[in-house]
Image: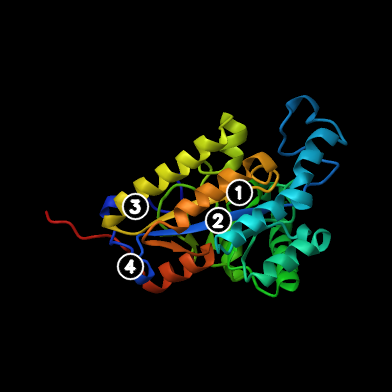
Amino acid sequence: MDNELFEYSAIVDREPIRWPDGARVAFYVGLNIEHYRVDRPSTSIFAGTAGQVPDPLNYGWRDYGPRVGFWRILESLDRHGIRASALLNSDVVERYPRIIEAGRQRDWAWLAHGRNNSVLQAEIPAADERAYLEEVLGTIERGTGKRPRGWMGPALSESFRTPQLLRELGVDYVLDWTNDDQPYPLRVPGLFSVPYSVELNDNTLFLGTGLTGPEFVRIVRDQLDRLWAESEAGGRVLALALHPFVTGQAFRARYLDEALAHIVEHPGVWVTTSDEIAAHYAATRTGDGVRSRSR
């Protein structure tokens, strides 16, 4: 079937995006704060027991995130003055209120990330999806004091109905479509896509490729260097996706610090949140954003 969710747009044909204060790269940390059901298989480090219920090996590995790993990453973010864009399962509000308290104290951006990470958005029955989204958004608003402006589905999942429903419920942007280095409009009026990454993502890098800490730092540097070079033609977005049960492991802490230090100390980097990137893009976007070309 044809893709009716968004249009094709070559990045070389767009009007340049200009970030505040002359910055060339907008940087945000997408911090996945998730709850996993103990009675359902999910993201695993060892496939041999992944189908068991309960699965102490894999569930315990995931549960390290809210118990320990989150707090280690929090120290690093604080050290570098970074406000997280929290990709929040609404179940976290009830189950881990101490995490919500920490984020509220730091004025984080709160994005809805489904109810939990054991049920994907496309698995929600069509007749129930609007009520499900209303419940997720409402729970996060009550817990954090802020209505989420952004959405990322569990495992970046959506149904074909999701974008329209999200917009009707007041959501401005989604992170699910990881196909660009700039924000762009979706075909639902008023809804935008903001860049997220499944490659510059600790889950993919450390677990999918067996990356070492020093290699992680090099990759982050390489990403910034290339985006910086290309940003002369228009601003770019650098999104760094983190999971507390992955980067929150003790032996990776120093490498996260090194990567974050390189980014925040780099000239011309706007250290911000996905909320602020979406708001700036929406406020400054003109027309269809396509640069006119000579014939």
For marks 1 and 4 on the same chain, the one whose residue lies earlier in the sequence: 4
Q: Position of residue 276 (x, y in %)?
A: 49, 68
Q: Amino acid at mark 3?
A: Trp
Q: Which mark is residue 228?
A: 3
Q: Residues within 10 Å of mark 4 (few under 14, many from 20)?
A: few
Q: CA distance from mark 1 to mark 2?
A: 7 Å
Identify the residue at horizontal 58%, vertical 68% (top origin). 149
- The amino acid beneath tag 2 is Val
The residue pinned by badge 4 equals 22
- Number of other residues with Cα within 10 Å of mark 3, as a class: few under 14, some 14 to 19, many 20 or more: many
Q: Residues within 10 Å of mark 2 (few under 14, many from 20)?
A: many
Earlier in the chain: of badge 1 and badge 3, it is 3
First along the sequence among labels 1 and 2: 2
Q: In the rendered structure, are the residues bearing label 1 and label 2 in contact, judged by CB atoms less than 8 Å apart?
A: yes
Residue at 63%, 45% in the rendered image: 253
> In the image, what residue type sits under mark 4?
Gly
Sequence-first disc among 2 and 4: 4
* Alpha carbons under labels 3 and 2: distance apart: 17 Å
Q: Where residue 221 sits: x, y (%)?
A: 43, 45
Q: Does residue 85 sit above or below 240 in this rendering?
A: below
Q: CA distance from mark 1 to mark 3?
A: 22 Å
The answer to whether any part of residue 81 appears in the image is yes
**Comes first in the chain, label 4 or label 3:** 4
Q: Residue at the left extreme?
A: 295
- Horizontal placement of 49 versus 159: left or right? right
Tell me the amino acid under the disc marked 1.
Leu
Name which quarter of the figure residue 207 lies in. Answer: top right
The residue where tag 2 is placed is 29
- Which residue in the structure is indicated by mark 1? 242
Q: Considering the numbered disc 3 on the image, is that residue within a helix, a strand or a loop?
A: helix
Which secondary structure, mark 1? strand
Q: CA distance from mark 1 to mark 4?
A: 27 Å
